[in-house]
Image: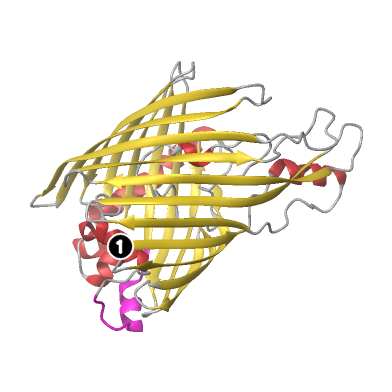
Amino acid sequence: MAHKGELMRRSWAALAAAVIVFASADVASAIPAFARRYGVECHLCHRGVPRLNRTGLRFKERGYRLENEDPFKPSDWIESIPVRARASGTHLFFEGGGSHTSGFVKLISAANLGSRLSYWVDSGLFLDDDDDTDVYSEPAEAWVRLDLVREGKLYVRAGRMELDLPFSQVRTPHLFSYAPYYLNTGREADSIADDHLALEVGGRLADDKYHWSAAVTSGADDPASAGAYEAAGREDESGAFEGNVYLRASRRGDTTRAGVFAYLGRNTLAVAPFGNALPSTWRDDVVRVGVDLDVWPSERLNVYGLFLHGRNGDALPNGARTRSLEVATTFQGAFVQADYHAVEKQVSGFLKEIALAATARASWTRRPTPDLAFKTSEWSVHPGLELWLRERFRLAFEYGFQGQGRPDLGAVQAELVF
């Protein structure tokens, strides 16, 4: 077992090694996989990695294809080696003292394999100064996509994936999560921001003006329910495939995008009654519905956000832990984010390009207390700064002002994509 101080040094060493690669590599080898394959610069699709611009969004929705792409050649795929890595080091600090340092290195391979087939797979290593061992991350996403009608007009995608969220949580450049995605009550553990085993169909209509998708997912695995069965020495009856459904539709203009989304289904929960080793199982209906808006008032300013309403039909056991409480609960959440791209400048020499963005997010949530006695509202404000060098090296700072007596917290991060 490694000592905690040694792990801290190793987490930063992983980032330092990535920075050395960044500093020593020539221009050709430093361009990430997609840019290398198509012979373009990263800013064609990104406003700072991993943030996608309009061209990048269309490239992604077509299954990693340009609008007018040459016929696929296996030699092009082999020569480009569509594998990239993201290395990051993050330091969290808390009001009143205390801090936490971690490092993460993720390998990603994604590409199209012709006019109809594309894929994504990633895996990584997490290094944490609070743990005694390093943690290998199983592939968070591993999926294939088949275009039934070319150019993304109708496709099917299957595997482990992030759902078609209005704003990606997995690939966000911001350091703190979008709070409404993770709202819940009682024993329910489902979140639309988690990776899901899913089968998704979708497409675009009216010359890329409308986009839609529908996915059937596995639902959430509740660790507490699984633990109750494990303690009883019984086979887990709470981990069955649930067949929940996620729906998404959006309309895109030149400078705006508006959409709606919904997550509907039910999950199996379980609890072990006092004095009885046999767990009690019940089903909890889950509903999440929301609206989202993404606006570019100018070339430099992006304002976006969403509102989410949720309902859990029956997410708590009763006091005797013999069955469910049979009480439905509702909750709401919203956030508004503004990103101002103050500087985007190409320069001569080693740096190539410098970009600076100022960010700010206001979040609000309203949900029941753990005992369901009444509802409480919470708010937070997260200002931040993001600096990019050579398109692929990012330094970020974000601070969270949290209301309702919660301690404030901040984070700094260095990230490299190569």
Residue shown at 67%/34% (left/top)?
A: 186
In front: 222, or 322? 322
Say above or below: 56 vs 182. below
Residue shown at 69%/49% (left/top)?
A: 267
Residue 324: image quadrant is: top right
Of all residues shown, which one is farthest toward the front? Answer: 206
Residue 303: image quadrant is: top left
> Residue 390 at what x, y percent from top left?
20, 51
In front: 48, or 270? 270
Residue shown at 80%/42% (left/top)?
A: 228
Residue shown at 27%/71% (left/top)?
A: 66
Of all residues shown, which one is farthest toward the right? Answer: 275
> Residue 143 at what x, y percent from top left?
50, 66
> Residue 115 at what x, y percent from top left?
36, 80
- Label 1, on which residue? 209
Q: Is residue 41 left or right of residue 228?
A: left
Q: Is residue 111 left or right of residue 226?
A: left
Instruction: Tell me how the rendering is colored.
Output: secondary structure
Q: Secondary structure at mark 1?
A: loop
Q: Is residue 224 magenta?
A: no
> Residue 335 at what x, y percent from top left?
40, 35
Q: Is residue 418 visible?
A: no
| Residue range highlighted in magenta | 68-83
Q: Is residue 78 visible?
A: yes
Quadrant where the C terminus sits is: bottom left
Say above or below: 55 vs 223. below
Quadrant where the N terminus sits is: top right
Q: Is residue 75 magenta?
A: yes
Say above or below: 208 vs 230. below
Q: Is residue 74 left or right of residue 392?
A: right
In front: 118, or 73? 118
